[in-house]
Amino acid sequence: MSKKDVFYNEAEKLYIQDQLTISEIESRLRVCEKTIRTWKAKGSWDEKKRRYLQERSSFHEELYSFSRTLMKKIQEDWEAGEKVDAGRLYTLTRMLPMITKVKDYEDVKALKEKDTTVKGLTEDIIKNIEKEVLGIE
């Protein structure tokens, strides 16, 4: 099996979904940086990453837009003296609190994903330094 067969999908996931840099992927998978850059270019990872981030962050915006459209239609009917369907009013009143909940959820999830990226010296790096530099085993 080639490196591509073994590591390509994992490297792509780490880059697109987990938001790791090429250097971080290189150290995690132990694959040459040049190889990862080639995969990134041929696989259009930047475009996939852009679409992934856009889809992930836009649900609350879509919900907001839908609620706003519904509210405008209700207001137009109201001002025209037409009977406003109770189902539409109920839907609107149920959706408004959900917009903030969805936005809060997306913000918390994005923050958690950002915090999971390990920064600084990990235990493995410290052990490696102790072994190779300091000669401690």
Image: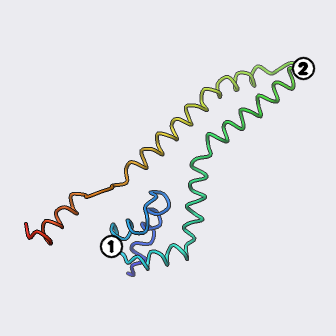
Marks 1 and 2, the one that precedes in the sequence: 1
SS category of the residue bearing label 1: loop
Question: Residue 12, relative to residue 107: is it above or below?
Answer: below
Q: Do the residues labelled 1 and 2 touch (CB within 8 Å)?
A: no
Residue at figure coordinates x 80%, y 30% from the top left: 72
Q: Which of 122 and 63 is in front in this view?
A: 122
The answer to whether 136 is drawn above or below residue 36 in the figure is above
Q: Residue at x 61, y 58 (%)?
A: 51
Q: Name the residue under label 1.
A: 30
Q: Whole-percent x and y of residue 2?
A: 39, 81
Instruction: Point out residue 135 in the picture as x, y percentages from the top left corner.
Output: 8, 70
Q: Position of residue 134 (x, y in %)?
A: 10, 68
**Left or right of 101: which side holds 135?**
left
Quadrant of the snapshot with the N terminus:
bottom left
Q: Quadrant of residue 42?
A: bottom right
The numbered mark at residue 87 is none
